Image (tube, helix red, strand yellow):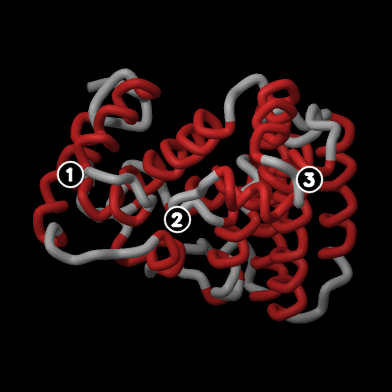
Amino acid sequence: MSTEHSHQNFSIFHDEKISYQEFLHREYNIIHAPYHPEIEFYECIKNGDVAKVNELCEEPFHTKPGFGTLSKNPVQSLKYHFVISTAMIARMCINQGLQLSESYNMSDYYIQRVDKAKTLEEVSELHDEMCLAYTKRMRKLQKASVCSKPVIACIDYIYDHLSTRITMEDLSEVTGLSTSYISRIFKKETGCTVSEYILLKKIETAKSMLVHSNYSIAQISDALAFPSQSYFTKVFRKYCGTTPKKYTPTGEE
């Protein structure tokens, strides 16, 4: 289904409130996006979204629908899919900035391990371990330029509380530092203010929700704790160059 069609379906849910956590827990059968669900999963990994990858790994790898039969042996067939998935993740993480040698070393390590697996469950468990290893590495990579522990603590808090209104007082409590000091070091180490960083991360999340769900714009605005839908639209247009209603993954209207 096209993104435009998904936007038309938003009206069905207009009066229902949802949370970002509900978005994470949604079932695959409500996804109406131009990409296969695996692509969304890979996007979460390369973006370092540990919480969401954990959520998406709740369904065992070997029970997910849509796998072709690559071998008459079910375990061997799943191993082939594991290798394909690992290769995709390795390449996407390289494109996102992970060193080529490190990414391929990780993929080689997990492919060698899966070769020894005897059951579907073993392959599934190793798949989750591999996905989370890449995700955590990508999250760490995103914070690599940040030197101080207080700023890292702030970034972790922001990632984990996108569904709430995050204040400087919250970050002060997390770090034990004054709001003025946090503001100063955060801007110095990340290149943007705390408020800008929070908005950027919320808009990134909103883009994913627009593409990978049929929640209404009002629901998404509410789920990400924007004070109003009009403000959400204003901020979205500022960072994306278009409105949420007209947004597509390619940025074309």
Q: Residue at x 65, y 31 (%)?
A: 183
Please give the residue where the numbered disc 3 appears in the rendered image.
137
The disc, 1 or 2, on the residue closer to the chain's N-terminal end is: 1
Q: Is residue 106 left or right of residue 154?
A: right
The amino acid sitting under disc 3 is: Arg
Image coords of residue 149 (percent x, y): 83, 43
> Which quarter of the rendered picture does the C terminus lie within?
top left
Q: In front here: 199 or 25?
A: 199
Residue 152 lies left or right of residue 220; in this view the side is: right
Q: Helix, strand or loop at disc 2?
A: loop
Disc 1 target residue: 7
The residue type indicated by label 1 comes to His
Instruction: Residue 203: give x, y in percent of width and height.
Output: 42, 37
Rendered residue at 34%/43% (across/down): 211
Please state which of residues 231 and 105 is positioned toward the viewer in this rendering: 231
Q: How far is disc 2 from disc 3 in space, using C-alphas?
A: 26 Å
- The dot on residue 243 is none
How packed mark 1 is, by other alpha carbons closer than 10 Å (few <14, some 14-19, many 20 or more), is many
Q: Earlier in the sequence, mark 2 or mark 3?
A: 3
Lower sequence index among marks 3 and 1: 1
Secondary structure type for disc 3: helix
Query: Which amino acid lies under the numbered mark 2 shown in the image of this protein?
Result: Thr
Q: Is residue 200 left or right of residue 104?
A: left
Is residue 141 shown left or right of residue 96?
right
Counting from the top left corner in percent of width and height, residue 46 is at 64, 41
Q: Residue at x 17, y 44 (%)?
A: 7
Q: Label 2: few (<14), some or many (≥20) within 10 Å?
A: some
Q: CA separation, marks 1 and 2?
A: 24 Å
| Residue wearing tag 2 | 164
Residue 133: give x, y in percent of width and height: 78, 55
